[in-house]
Image (tube, coloured by chain):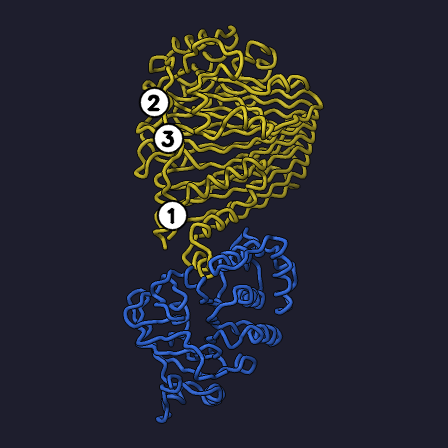
Chain colours: A yellow, B blue
Amino acid sequence: MSAVLQNLVNQPYRHGFVTEIESDIAPKGLNEEIIRLISSKKNEPEWLLAFRLQAYEKWLSMTEPRWQNVKYPEIDFQSISYYSAPKPKKKLASMDEVDPELLRTFEKLGVPMHERAALAGVAVDVIFDSVSVATTYKEKLAEVGIIFCSISEAVHTHPELVKQYLGTVVPTGDNFYAALNSAVFTDGSFCFIPKGVKCPMDLSTYFRINTEGSGQFERTLIIAEEGASVSYLEGCTAPRFDTNQLHAAVVELIALDNAEIKYSTVQNWYAGDEKGVGGIYNFVTKRGLAKGVNSRISWTQVETGSAITWKYPSCILRGDNSVGEFYSVAVTNNYQQADTGTKMIHIGRNTRSTIVSKSISAGHSNSSYRGLVRVAPTAENARNYSQCDSMLIGDQCGANTFPYIQVNNNSAKVEHEASTSKIGEDQLFYFLQRGIGAEEAVSMIINGFCKEVFQQLPMEFAVEATKLLSFKLEGSVG
Amino acid sequence: MIDQNSKTLLEVRGLHANVSGIEILKGVDLTVRSGEIHAIMGINGSGKSTFAKILAGHPAYEVTAGTIIFNDRNLFDLDPEERARAGVFLAFQYPIEIPGVANNQFLRLAYNTVQSQRGKEELDPLEFDDFVREKMKLLEMSPDFLDRSVNEGFSGGEKKRNEILQMALLEPKLAILDETDSGLDIDALRIVANGVNQLTNKDNATILVTHYQRLLDYIVPDYVHVMESGRIIKTSGKELAKELEAHGYDWINADDGCSTTGVRA
């Protein structure tokens, strides 16, 4: 029986191909010169270079965090290349001019941009290694005043907006990896939804790391003005390499009065092989500021890849009546490690937050939920509900829950529930005894377990997530 | 209903089995023909639940000797799901909860899988809904069972009814009811027994595994077997259950005239 479970869990990684595209790579290592190089390659204004250099100064004085429940060897930050871009043959005016090799890559990934974008009504921004390749649907969005482009483009076309908001939710010195990102970020997505506009389609970004030994440091900034709303999707893959690659992204969300931002991620970075060799170190800082009254920020994530995942998409609930949500599924297998969760910081009155975290661990993997709920003295009538469920497949894996609760206002109500279960022989046997095969049984059990989170995903993503999970755990029961 | 000419559905010979290296079954013999209802009784630890699970192919038990022929096939050649599709059904003593999986979704998948394996027509969700609601009336179940997660938060009686509902849907050749009466109040017992009675016919057979006589007031067996220390030590008609109720299991060992051959004939 456990042999079937083992097989199910041990499916090969589908996205492990490398695309033969000439890259423009910066020499390995990090110093002021490299930062100036990145900035000049991107032809950046002086204020952005200053932002980078200030972040670099802070980074130099910081040490790598070690409090998380993951183990990995010391990272040599001087052995990473901080800039890698596919070499453009000429300037791209339309999608048709994108390197066909690159387009084939996206097809292998299941993201044929034209068709998929058109069929699904999704606008896609594609970040390849570190550079944004093409943003679809830009013109259509521009008609309603939505700006959706790469952040390097926004720096040139809307410098005042970038300057006003960049680093306001995640300051340059927020943490070690955020500081690193602020110093060396090469691209990412920028999205601005003006006052009163409901974004007519889901916006989507696909990230891919292609070059061995390069890091990916993208930066995403999303602003929803008063009464605006947007649903934003993010997908990630990487080829298979024996060396570990660093992915240190920063995502900042800002919601003004009555605005709503829903941010969904399906993360499937290369996780390393079955012995734990290779894979992405996914050290990411994601934070949303529910700045205005009645604003809402919602994070949904399905984390299946990466050798190590270290991320806590958080909400700062500053506006009165603002709402923060975090829905997460984290799947780990083989020697993967995940330390993930959220922070809900209640500052405004009547603020509410919901946390639903589901972790599934198989093989020798280890998964931790780490979450902070803080209620400030100003947060009258704050409410939080947290639920953390862990499922174990086999007896070599582990799951931990680290909830931190700090309440400084007597009117607050904070609830926390946690459970741990095992896909045991008996659950599986029940399905078999009714004639249902093992693979279908495991897929059903796991989808049932994750149901509350999958319900939060946009339809198309929910289907993809369901498939990804079945795929990831295929052959692991038996 | 005993008919010596009806087809032999199950033939167990010299069955020995271990769990975690400890021998639980020490030579079980049993023959079941179509149309028959058998009760296997015995004290806790006598091996009767183990026997039920082995018939269904539970992986925790290791068969060390003996043979089982089911419907002319070697049962050991079939994986648990193949046994289910071939018509072996086990109503569990402790039906497990499956959070997040809707009962109707589970029931329909089981039904359609078994139907397609038997070369019969599958039902789409709407057709199935009508079909299952009809079956639920048999067990006096409220339709809201369909939307709840499988067995989650069900009372003991609700879980057992859900088991018999599955039996009604899957129409097994051989139904094994493992302590289906445990945890049932008298009303639920009557409903469940009534459901089982309506499902038995001349083409299928039922094995009731039970500790108490009271279930047998409602489902009348053709044979009663007493199991002790991993063997069937006595076989007789339905009156045996009453005697056990009156005298206790110790009474059997005091009785020299017992027979283990009654079933074979």
Q: Say which quarter of the image contains residue B164.
A: bottom right
Q: Residues within 10 Å of mark 2 (few under 14, many from 20)?
A: some
Question: On the rendered structure, is A171 left or right of A80?
Answer: right
Q: Chain of mark 2?
A: A
User: Where is residue B219 drawn, in percent x and y?
Assistant: 54, 79
Q: Chain of mark 1?
A: A
Q: Residues within 10 Å of mark 3 (few under 14, many from 20)?
A: some
Label 2: which residue? A212
Label 3: which residue? A16
User: Where is residue B221 drawn, in percent x and y?
Assistant: 49, 82
Rounded to the nearest whole Å, what is the CA distance between mark 1 and mark 2? Answer: 30 Å
Rounded to the nearest whole Å, what is the CA distance between mark 3 and mark 1? Answer: 20 Å
Label 1: which residue? A476
Residue type at the position of mark 3: Gly
Relative to A218, does residue A322 appear above or below in the rendering? below
Q: Chain of mark 3?
A: A
Labels 1 and 2 within one chain = yes
Question: On the rendered structure, is A277 left or right of A144?
Answer: left
Q: Earlier in the sequence, mark 1 or mark 2?
A: 2
Please count the marks in the image. Answer: 3
